């Protein structure tokens, strides 16, 4: 049983990183589903769902900043297995970079877009967020389109990330999936 | 290395791919790609285009309009009904917009056309309240399905380029629950101008005060100008209603009392097509005063969205389905039109500067 595919990835992520990953995964998927729904359905719960979407967006923005700080300060993050082809390692690093980029950009563009559109940014519980930029209707239209494009992009990135993680777990069985799973 | 059987391999690949595909299906359903019979804001936008809305930067409804600025003086009754910071302020800045209801931005003024008043009130404490009011007393639409049929019935005939009265009649005939709305709207007293007109929210809202008491209300902006019945439209001047408003504003400020009609037990909160009891209490929550007119192309309200679900704390939406519909369509329309190259508005800054019902426009 010394096949190279069975050499596990070294170590695993610290528990706080694993917790952040899964909490954010749940929040991001929920926010995407709510966002897609309110943009494409004239549902009766529109106002409430929109407030929830804004609130979740700001929570995600705070968490992604926390996560970036955590990622930089964690000394021993597990490295990818040595047996992975070089192109696959590049693909992994690029897709993780893109995931971080989209997670950060989506709430920021959402914030800027509502500011440019002159919308008050009120969160669940009545908290007011100050505008990020000034009122500019043309910019609002552009940022609104960008917000949609980023959302579609993030949806596909998440689907690819899930499939890649499960490919590591079930086909390659190289321990990469386990680095992000809870152990006792 | 052990090699899994082909059967086991396909199970493993299913385990790799199926979770992503399931999530993809959920995203596609949320995005309206699958699931069929959903009402999307795009459906409604398409109907506005069929009803004459151009794609040159104008609102998809209430397209012809003009901006005004002024202030709002809240009353004690407002503070009793709602804890909103709006009612605790004084002399709050207001940006307003008077308009004609149809989706055509270059429509000749005519007393038969429904008119609207939309405005935004802001408080020093960051509250933002937007209202979009119309001068008919009831909404001839009960729910989303009525809305789809109603806006569909407004489609212009490809030959006459006018709405087809037969389709409008068919819409009304098929909906006995709208009989009251159609008759009250037809029997309303039409005023001589935009300045002596009453404007209604149609939709209902909840006000919550400091003790947590919730009151359902409908809004009406009642003019302080005396009412004059509409005369015959000016044949020489396609902007005579707007010019009359500008001329009056040049002489003196114009005020409206913002009145809350308080729902009684049994009054329909979630149905803007039904009247409330005639004895319902009415309280003025403040006075709205406009002093200055501007062209939409100049500043202020031009692109602004008057989404009636943009509310300060202390005012909330009801489960009126039309409010949710309006909000979703307004956002769609706003992001679409703001990205278009706009042609000049019919009420230009030149008209604002010299609003004379001039004879030189004759024969144009």
Image (tube, rainbow, N blue to C red):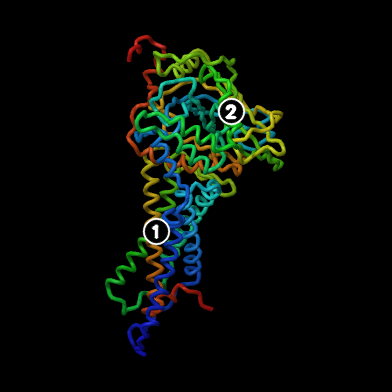
Q: Name above or below for residue B342 compared with residue B21.
A: above
Residue A122's label in the rendered image is none
Which residue is drawn at the image coordinates 42% and 37% (left, top)?
B48
Neighbours of disc 2 within 10 Å: few (<14), some (14-19), many (20+): few
Q: Name above or below for residue B40 compared with residue B95.
A: below
Q: Residue furthest top?
A: B359
Please give left or right for residue B222 compared with residue A29 in the image: right
Please give left or right for residue B257 compared with residue B50 in the image: right
Q: Which residue is at the front of the view, B180 or B246?
A: B180
Instruction: Return the x and y of residue A96 as percentages of the image width and height.
Output: 37, 65
Which residue is drawn at the image coordinates 38% and 24% (left, top)?
B346
Q: Which residue is at the front of the view, B144 or B73?
A: B144
Q: Label 2 belongs to which residue?
A: B183
Instruction: Return the x and y of residue B26 as percentages of the image width and height.
Output: 46, 60
Please tell me in which quadrant of the rendered image residue B59 appears: top left
**Chain letter of disc 1 in the image:** A
Residue A154's label in the rendered image is 1
- The answer to whether residue A17 is seen in the rendering is yes
């Amino acid at each position: 049983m010394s096949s190279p595919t069975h050499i596990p990835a070294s170590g695993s992520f610290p528990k706080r990183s694993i917790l952040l990953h899964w909490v954010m995964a749940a929040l991001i998927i929920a926010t995407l589903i709510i966002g897609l729904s309110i943009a494409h359905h004239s549902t009766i719960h529109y106002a409430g769902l929109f407030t929830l979407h804004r609130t979740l967006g700001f929570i995600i923005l705070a968490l992604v900043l926390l996560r970036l700080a955590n990622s930089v300060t964690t000394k021993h993050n597990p490295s990818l297995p040595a047996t992975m082809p070089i192109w696959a390692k590049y693909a992994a690093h690029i897709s993780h970079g893109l995931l971080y980029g989209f997670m950060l950009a989506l709430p920021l563009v959402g914030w800027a877009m509502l500011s440019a559109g002159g919308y008050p940014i009120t969160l669940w519980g009545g908290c007011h967020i100050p505008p990020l930029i000034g009122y500019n209707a043309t910019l609002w239209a552009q940022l609104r389109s960008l917000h949609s494009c980023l959302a579609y992009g993030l949806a596909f990135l998440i689907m690819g990330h899930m499939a890649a993680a499960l490919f590591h777990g079930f086909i390659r069985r190289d321990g990469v999936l386990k680095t992000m799973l809870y152990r006792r | 290395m052990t090699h899994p059987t082909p059967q086991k391999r396909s199970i493993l690949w299913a385990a790799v791919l199926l979770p992503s595909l399931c999530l993809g299906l959920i995203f596609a359903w949320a995005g309206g790609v699958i699931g069929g019979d959903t009402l999307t804001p795009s459906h409604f936008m398409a109907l506005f285009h069929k009803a004459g809305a151009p794609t040159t930067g104008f609102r998809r409804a209430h397209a012809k309009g003009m901006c005004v600025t002024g202030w709002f003086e809240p009353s004690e009754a407002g503070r009793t009904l709602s804890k909103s910071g709006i009612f605790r302020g004084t002399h709050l800045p207001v940006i307003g917009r008077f308009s004609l209801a149809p989706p055509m931005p270059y429509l000749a003024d005519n007393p038969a056309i429904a008119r609207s008043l939309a405005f935004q009130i802001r408080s020093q404490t960051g509250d933002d309240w937007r209202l979009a009011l119309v001068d008919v007393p009831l909404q001839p639409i009960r729910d989303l399905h009525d809305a789809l049929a109603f806006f569909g019935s407004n489609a212009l005939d490809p030959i006459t380029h006018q709405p087809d009265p037969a389709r409008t009649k068919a819409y009304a005939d098929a909906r006995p629950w709208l009989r009251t709305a159609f008759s009250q709207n037809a029997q309303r007293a039409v005023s001589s101008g935009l300045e002596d007109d009453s404007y209604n929210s149609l939709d209902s809202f909840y006000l919550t005060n400091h003790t947590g008491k919730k009151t359902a209300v409908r809004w009406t902006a009642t003019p302080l100008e005396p009412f004059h019945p509409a005369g015959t439209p000016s044949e020489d001047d396609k902007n005579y209603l707007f010019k009359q408003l500008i001329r009056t504003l040049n002489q003196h400020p114009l005020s409206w009392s913002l009145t809350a009609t308080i729902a009684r037990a049994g009054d329909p909160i979630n149905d803007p097509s039904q009247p409330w009891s005639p004895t319902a209490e009415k309280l003025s929550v403040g006075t709205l005063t406009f002093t200055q007119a501007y062209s939409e192309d100049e500043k202020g309200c031009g692109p602004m969205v008057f989404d009636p679900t943009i509310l300060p704390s202390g005012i909330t939406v009801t489960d009126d389905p039309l409010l949710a519909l309006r909000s979703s369509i307004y956002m769609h329309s706003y992001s679409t039109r703001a990205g278009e190259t706009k042609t000049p508005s019919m009420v230009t800054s030149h008209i604002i500067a010299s609003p004379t019902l001039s004879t030189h426009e004759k024969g144009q």
